[in-house]
Amino acid sequence: MSNYQSRGTMKKTISQTKHLCWHVALFSILLVASVFYPLPTLGQTGREVRETRIRELKQSGDRWVEIDVYNQMLTAWEGSEPIFAVLVSTGRKSARTPAGVFAIQSKHEVARMQGEGYDLPVVLYTMYYDGHYAIHGADWHNKFGQAVSAGCVNVPVREAFWLFEWASVGTPVVVRD
């Protein structure tokens, strides 16, 4: 009986050790990830997270882009200095531009964009910042200052070129509603 108990105890100890190792490994991964992808403070709303990030960016001196959906305005910043601003067209009511904190993921001088009801084979100076959402030039309308897009941020082509040259992959993008 004593022999059986010691084997059972040993199995239990090994099982507990495996369980503990799994937890330590998970904790380590989360700790490292939180350094590169900080989580919002508990209790903060999306708006508070955006405002906190804006304060951090203004103190940093880094380049970043702010999109104000309510005022249909894009502003390029270097720290706390606004260095460029332009009227834009964000998503219409049925295809709103999502608010949040993002970063430019990829840049394309020319891109093709397709969706329900549109197929644009030449979209100039496209910078994707959240999945299929992008900041890009728009030469097919002149309704800047109005929410008319399919969700992206439409910018006049000349200004889109300037922004494309100024920003790089990784440049923060803050979209405010």
Image (cartoon, rainbow, N blue to C red):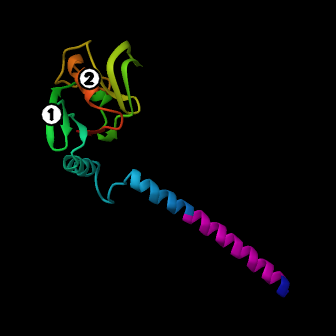
Q: Does residue 159 appear in this view? A: yes
Image quarter (top left, top right, bottom left or bottom right) of the C terminus? top left
Q: In this view, does 157 lie above or below 88?
A: above
Residue placed at 84% from the left, 84% from the top?
A: 3
Q: In this view, does 44 lie above or below 90?
A: below
- x and y percent of residue 93 in the render? 27, 29
Residue placed at 65% from the left, 71% from the top?
A: 17
Out of 127 and 114, give the one closest to the viewer.
Answer: 127
Mark 1 nearby-residue class (10 Å; few <14, some 14–19, many ≥20): few
Q: Which of marks 2 and 1 is nearer the N terminus?
A: 1
Tag 2: amino acid: Asn
Dominant secondary structure (helix, strand or loop) of the stretch shown in magenta: helix
- x and y percent of residue 98 in the render? 31, 36
Figure quadrant of residue 143 = top left
Tag 1: amino acid: Ile
* SS for callout 1: strand
Magenta-colored stretch includes residue 9: yes
Out of 125 and 62, give the one closest to the viewer.
Answer: 62
Q: Which tag is nearer the camera, tag 2 or tag 1?
A: 1
| Left or right: 155 as drawn, with respect to 34 | left
Residue holding disc 2 = 154
Residue holding disc 1 = 83
- x and y percent of residue 75 in the render? 18, 33
Magenta-colored span: 4-24
- x and y percent of residue 54 in the render? 22, 47
Residue placed at 47% from the left, 57% from the top?
A: 30
Image quarter (top left, top right, bottom left or bottom right) of the N terminus? bottom right
| Left or right: 15 as drawn, with respect to 124 | right
| Left or right: 171 as drawn, with respect to 21 | left
* SS for callout 2: strand
